[in-house]
Structure formats: structure tokens, C-alpha cells
Image (cartoon, rainbow, N blue to C red):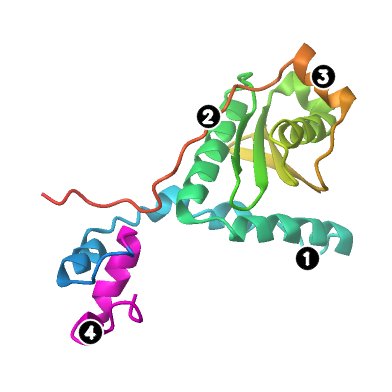
Amino acid sequence: MIDKWEIEAAALPEQVFVGQYLGGDLNSPSSLDYAKHIQLLDHRADEWDISGIISEFVDPNSPKSEQAHYYTITRELALLKRNELREFKTRFKLSVEKARANQFVRPYRIAFPRTGCGFVFIPVTKDALPYRRKGLQNFTFAHKYELKLTKCIGVSIADDGNGWFTEEWFYTEFPWEHDPRLEAALQNNYPFHKINETELPRYTYKDAT
């Protein structure tokens, strides 16, 4: 923007360009009006901050191979923008709530074409605990296959009682290719809710009034 609007930029403070970037209007001449985007920005960090989710990812005493597995998951999460993290956290929290209530629901899921990665969230009821790991893998593969993704991350969440819950994660990455077995499984026993494509607003703003 500074290169494009050099004359205007020489007389404007940095806040203008940050505000113009936040507003997403990069093709108009810069002006002081754009500085208001900074003042009106509503961070709502509690909606998209997932540090509490990933802080317990890696046990330093776990095998190196297991630690490497979680690093790949952390890498994918680090690629997400705050609007995408908000959707991730919303589904994660819903899964925790359903697991604690021992309520069966279809898995929650989302995918981000920008990174080529999908996520599936599986609340585990008590009767399904013996099949937890197999279910986690199957749902992750099914979500990846249906949306023709190259990467997918699944997480299953089960209630441990007394306010505690357990997460199990699964990461898979390989080129998509036609799989008649998965195709038939999705047609005969579709396990998900249908998902819709939408464009997420990147930032939220306080009421200007």
C-alpha cells in the first residue's frame, strides 16, 4: 500500500495502514478514516485462543515418534487464522460438552481449502469407548476422502469424570485418490452432517455507535 499510494503515505501515520489492512480494502487510496479499524477491533481472544487445548499436547517422557506426531498437528493449527481458529475451538468445545453429557451426536467437522487440511471432532459416549481408536481413524479417513483433502486431523474426546476429559488425536497426510471401499461406506452409512461452504469474516469489530 505504501508503494502504491506513495504520496498519501508520506503524510499518514502507521495506524492508517494497519487499519486499512484489517479492513481488507487494499485498492483504495489510504486516508485517516482507516485508522478507526484499529480502535473498533474486537479481539475476543477467548473465542479463538486455543493455547489451553495444545498446551498439554506433548508429554516430554513420551516416545520421540509420538512427540513428532503431535508436532505435525501443532504445525497445522499454527497455520490457521483467528477466524479459522474460532471455528475449530467452537467444535472442540461442543465435543467436550457432548462427551461430558454422554450424548451421542454425529461428529463435528470443518475444512480449510486455504491450507488443504480438514478437522473432525468426535464426542465419545461411554458405550463407544472400546471402539474409540478405530472410530477416530475411520472418521478422519472418511472426512478426508469426501472432501478430497490431502491432510486431515481427527480428535476424539471422552469424559473421564470429575471434570476431566481425555483427547486422542490422529493425523494423516497423503494424496487423495479414488477408494471404492470408502466410496461405498459413505454411500451406505453416511456418518456426518452435510457441510456448507462459507467465507468467514477474518476480524470482528465493536459496534461503531
Is 103 rendered above or below residue 25? Answer: above
**Mark 4: which secondary structure?**
helix
Q: Is residue 89 left or right of residue 39?
A: right
Is residue 8 shown in magenta? yes
Q: Are marks 2 and 4 in contact (CB under 8 Å)?
A: no
Mark 1 → mark 3, Cα distance in angstroms: 39 Å
Q: Which residue is mark 2?
A: 196
Per the model, the C-alpha gap separating discs 1 and 2 is 39 Å
- The answer for how far apart the CA atoms under marks 2 and 3 are is 21 Å
Q: How many marks?
A: 4
| Residue segment shown in magenta | 1-25
Q: Residue 20 colored magenta?
A: yes
Res. 185 mark: 3
At label 2, which amino acid type do we have? Asn
> How much space separates mark 4 and mark 3, taking CA atoms?
61 Å
Residue 36: horizontal and vertical position, in percent?
Answer: 19, 64
Tell whether label 4 touches label 1 (CB within 8 Å): no
